[in-house]
Every structure is written in structure tokens, then in C-alpha cells.
Amino acid sequence: MKKRKKKFKSISLKLSARQMRSLMNYCEARKITPNKLIKNKIKYYTDGFDKIVPQKFYAQHNQLDLFDKASETLDIFG
């Protein structure tokens, strides 16, 4: 049987000159390529979410529900 080829997708991003120098200096100091550094840093967000994303990672629809429950608020006048 032949091995199945992996399909890769490309992503491009823009960095300022200062950010690029910082990235290259960091990579040179750590003896790692920029591509490997970026892949390692986003691994947490890319591994395991190909089928379904756990509920805790979704943005909450209404994060501030302070004003929804009027009966539970303090009443200073009575």
C-alpha cells in the first residue's frame, strides 16, 4: 500500500520590520526555524479541534448577565 500524501495549506501574515528582527533573533538564539516556532506555538489551538470544538472554547453569547435578573439585584430604597 502506498502512503497517503498529507495535504498542507498556506497561511501568510505581515510583520513589521521590528517584529521580524525579533522573530529572527529569537529563532537564531533557540536554533529553531521561524516556521517550527510558529507551528509549536499554535499547536494547542490546532490539535484536536478538527472534528468538534469543546463548548468551553466558544465565546459566550451574553457574558454580562448582570441586568437580566432584576429580582436578584439589591434595592437600596426598600
Image (cartoon, helix red, strand yellow):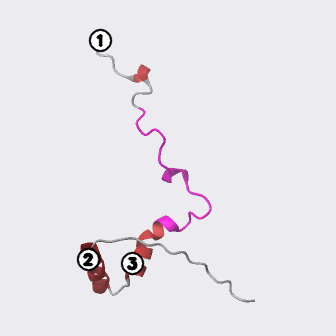
For the point 43% across and 20% down, the residue is: 71
Three-letter code, disc 1: Phe
Q: In the rendered view, does 27 fall on the left or right side of 71?
A: left
- Which mark, by number, is residue 77? 1
Does the stretch in magenta take in 51?
yes
In the displayed structure, does residue 6 sit left or right of residue 57?
Answer: right
Of the two numbered discs 2 and 1 on the same chain, state the one appearing first in sequence. Answer: 2
The residue wearing badge 2 is 22
Q: Amino acid at mark 3?
A: Leu
First of labels 1, 3 by sequence position: 3
Query: Regarding mark 3 in the picture, which secondary structure is present there?
Result: helix
Sequence-earlier tag: 3 or 2: 2
Residue situated furthest top in the rendering: 78
* Left or right of 61, for residue 14: left
Secondary structure that dominates the magenta span? loop
User: The N terminus is located in which quarter?
Assistant: bottom right
Query: Residue 37: which numbered mark, if any?
Result: 3
Vertical placement of residue 6 versus 43, above or below: below
Q: Residue at horizontal 44%, vertical 25%?
A: 69
Query: Which residue is at the far left?
Result: 18
* C-alpha distance separating marks 3 and 2: 13 Å
Q: Position of residue 66 (x, y in %)?
A: 39, 30
Image point (64%, 84%), residue name: 5
Magenta segment: 45-65
